[in-house]
Image (spheres, rainbow, N blue to C red):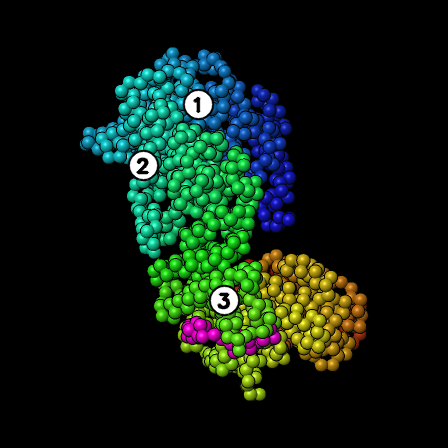
Amino acid sequence: MDAPEEDLDIKLQKISADLITDFDQALPFFLRKPNTHTHTHNSNGNNTPRSRVRARETHRLASSLLDPFQELPQLLDPYLPRWIPLLGDAFLDYHRAQQTSARSRALSSRGAAASALLMPLPAAVCRILYTLCKIRGEKVVVRFLSNETRHLELLLSALEEAERTPGGWEWEERYVVLLWLSQMMFAPFDLATISSTDAVEDGEGLPVIRGLEWPAVGLPGIAVRILPLAIKDMQALGVLDALVRWALVALRPVVDADGEGEDAQKTPYHYIGVLSFLSGILASSADTSDMDRYLTTLFQAVHGASAEGGESGLPSVGSSALARKTVIKVIRAIAVLILRNSQQDMASMELVETTIGFLLESLADNDTPVRLAASKALSIITLKLDADMASQVVEAVLESLTKNVLWRKDARDPTAPRTRDLTAVNPLEWHGLMLTLSHLLYRRSPPAENLSDIIQALVMGLSFEQRNPSGGSIGANVRDASCFGIWALARRYTTKELLAVKTPASLLARLHAPGTSVLQALATELVVAACLDPSGNIRRGSSAALQELIGRHPDTVVKGIWVVQTVDYHSVALRSRAIQEVALNVTILSGGYGEAVLDSLLGWRGIGDPDAASRRAAGTSYGTITAQLAKEAADPMGRFTQSVSQVLDRIKSLQPRQVEERHGLLLSFASVLDSLPSVASTIPQDGNRPTLDEFIQLSLSGLEHTLSECSTKTYRRPELIAEAASNLVISSLPLLQAATVSASASASTTTITDPFATTLIPGPTLLSQPDTSISRLANVLGARRPASLEPIIALLTRTLPAWLLRPEEEVIPPASSASLILLLFSTPSERETTIRSWASAVRTRPTGRNSTAGGFFSALVMSYSVVSTLDLQEADKSLICDAILERWDTDKDTDMRVLMLRSLTGSELLGGNVRVFLPLLQEGLDDYTMNARGDVGSLVRFRAVRATRGLWEAFADDHEKMGTVSSLFLRVLRLAAEKLDRVRAEAQVCLAAVLKSSHAATLRTSTFSSRGYFSFLLDLLRARDDRLHPAMAEAVSSGIGTGTGPASPGRSGQDDKWMEELMAGFVSSADTGNEDLVIATRAALCDFCCAQSSDNVNGSNVDLVCTALVRNLKSRQGQDRVLVPTLEVVAFLFHVGIFARCNAVDYKSLCLQVQKAGYKTGNVRKIEACIKVYGAIAALDDGDENKRSAGGAGDGGNRREAAAEARKRLGALAFHPWPRVRSLVVDEVWELLMALGEEPVAERLKGVDWGAADKASVRELVAAVGLA
């Protein structure tokens, strides 16, 4: 599939060549002076570098030309070897020139500061280089910088000078220079060969040391990369010892004379830099003994600095997550260096134990980077410990997982084993502990015989979840760490070792058969997580871990290869697909996976999810998986009964406040009942009858209990309960059918013999049945309703009206469908009473603020299918239609009309009574109601277009009925060209329904805002016989579809009416739409007007369009939504020279219509449009007699009179009381005079503020320019 045009990477690929070419051509001239006359060059033969460059040009190169490549950075790779050396050489040449030139950098800096438009060249170069590092990565960019050691002194000197100069460098300069130095340090060289002076600096004065405190991104890290490389060659000078002492002093809190600490004066970056330096020094000396004598001292200083509340604690370190993370790295390096020795003394072991304790405490840190660093440190240290002490660390981690874990008994079954309750544990600590176990497994620290408890902990972490006070999830990071742990377990341990691990009893208790291997148990848990977890990262992580597990340990998991292909990394990305499709497919592979998924669907990952859409998907999945398991079971109805029993038991144990769980469980119950027909069809007629009867009794009892609670209890979110209970009623259709058939079979005198009534029908498919089938079903079921259904029907009759009154979008469809189930199992007298009560509710407007009775509309429309079963009087047969039409006529509320049209869309009621509802649809298509919310009428128009589309599609093969609804055609055509995207897109699809197949495909594939789309609409008039449905084309041509009378002379009245309606919608897109829409529509209109019509009888396209616009100005006076855009489009057509070519327009009459439009109006935009049209008419050229008809309306006299009238109207508007209007008139007069070549007269308009001029000046102007 092609990517959409709006994607940034697609746009970048299109313009990348232009961006690169622009940058490549601009860079040399940006960096260096041309020097074409003086021929001055530097020592390398290059042109002299500039001292300062434009800041705007720097911004253009860095932001406008390079930044877009962050989407596709690899596009820059071929050009980096040329660009980066150019930038680096310019930087070096600039500083080399500063050293040898009399002008100092300070002077250059002052000059740059004097102008905000300029900036020093090094700052610009480094900003561009940093942008390249940001896009492509510093490791790629630094490879192309020169690593010749002769540049080292120059860079260091520039860095030192910048630190001495007030203002100094920008942080990008520091970043690039330090990055460059870190690369140069890898080249071998003698330190004595790079210094041209004998200057000596103390430790504090080294620029690299000072760089440790710089707060910019990456600066401390780059400085740390430089120092260890330099210190290796400087130990003989005592540099290492001096720097360690400096670091210890920097970490020691200083107390002033008043006894107050000075730590607050230093930023956290100071300590981050020092700690990073120590970490780098310790890491670089891992294979040497250089740092051994400092280990204890450093540990005490660093550990003391991180102690909160202690005497040696530093608040700046404790308050920064990055500082705490760096402390952990230093302490870890110290512990590893100590454990490197084979013999340990007591002090060393105490230091290691203190380190382990500190790291265990850090696992509960509030910041994720700190927890991650602590977990990695623990795993690295544990790997260095002996087996006994390493096992103690693992035991300490596992023991921490038992803190604050509560054990609860099952209230429904006191004999059942207790379950863990993790609501009181610290989720941050659990995340750290899971990360620690995962890193331990990744480094294969625990022996294989100790894996059982670790696996049990990982499985607990895989299903860990907690909610914050606002309801958000805070357990995803724990589950993510658990996925990593299982992945590491599968990767680091052999199949033999894992098969030897005893499966934890807690895993066997969770639906795993005795003897299940630990690999199979882990695979099942990963399948559940991959299908149900609410976080996409966890689903994909579980899928990756499952792939690793099955791939590394083949033939140990049931259907392993097929499971990996089903639970694919990409398949589980979309949660709804993972819950419904992937879970069902993996159940088909093996019932064991299905049982585990089914059990988890009744937990927090299914029916307990806070997202309503996820609960709906979980409920659907519960029913489909139950059906699949039942089909494979020896006793299908027994398996069905088991699933329903589990759901009903959980429903009965819920508290009234657990609305979300009740919503999910009711939907699960409904989904199971939906699958009843498919499972019952597999049961032989003479087999398993007691099991089926048991299922029917159990389900009827649960249905009655649910309806009873809905009628007697008030819930926190009643809309969720109404939705779920309504869906349950719909899904209970096969259950109620089975109960009716079963009761009929037991009574030999009332046996149901109709095969259609005895065949179980899934509830959701009932609405797709034709009305004759529904009425046939109602006749049988209502007459033979058993006594066991009486309480259910009574409860439903009492409860359903409250559901039908709910205004929520999620409740109306299921509640109205549930009303049809009620009618099916009601007696004829009950049906009549119910339908009359609904009709009464529809006629009467509710008094409640939010009660629109939307459910009653849909219920009444659906009841049309069973009205034929009632014995009604002739006057009552139109009961439903009369109720709806009466409400439509008396209630103008937009929301009500939207609900009414939505209920009629696609219904048999609308199709069977199209002549009755035709005025309603016409009014809906013409609804332009405006209020404080905006164009709310567009909601009605949208629904009316959709209802019209349903009629046209239904009547595609019926010429007579298609002719009946053809009167809607021009209204839909108008809406297909209007400015609102939503309405226009729906009208496009609707219009395609009455086109021939080839042309319908062309229209559907056109973008509804494109030039081609609007050209198609304009050309449709001339090609209607070839493109339209034959019945529609015939109706339109005969005037039925347009509502016109006989043809007018010269051109048919149908064509005029067609173009008037089209232009009424077209002008809104051509004027008030978005910019792209305005451009497309105006271009299409110009193309149409300029095209030569093949139909000379009906006139040219120009005449067709212009006369339609003029007629709309006359017929739609007062409708500003059409009038103002029409004026603007008329002015536009004048401006492009099209309207003046029309000889069928009376221009004087046009002036009159424009005058009427602007008369006493307060709409400034309308007045502006009128002024534009006046100016265009006043500029009409009457000199070319060949352009006019001999005696038509557009003759020269008419144009002259119209031009004079237009000038007169402009003169009158020049005295308008609003200054803005007067200014608009003067602007238009200026354009008029310049177009007529009257420049001397136009000069009189200059130099005066006509918005503030007095009347005498305006009167003199009007007389001077001939506007009187």
**Numbered range of the magenta stretch:** 771-799
| Residue 1108, magenta (yes or no) | no
For marks 2 and 3, give the one nearer the viewer.
3
| Residue 773, magenta (yes or no) | yes
Q: Nearer the viewer, residue 522 or 1055?
A: 522
* Other-residue count near label 3 (Cα within 10 Å), few / some / many at <14 / 14–19 / ≥20: many
Residue on which the image places disc 1: 226
Q: Residue at x 66, y 75 (%)?
A: 965
**CA gap, disc 3 to disc 1?**
78 Å
Q: Residue at x 37, y 61 (%)?
A: 652
Residue on which the image places disc 2: 399
Q: Residue at x 30, y 41 (%)?
A: 403
Residue on which the image places disc 3: 735
In the image, residue 807 above or below residue 477: below
| For marks 2 and 3 on the same chain, the one whose residue lies earlier in the sequence | 2
Q: Nearer the viewer, residue 619 or 321?
A: 619
* Other-residue count near label 2 (Cα within 10 Å), few / some / many at <14 / 14–19 / ≥20: few
**CA gap, disc 2 to disc 1?**
43 Å
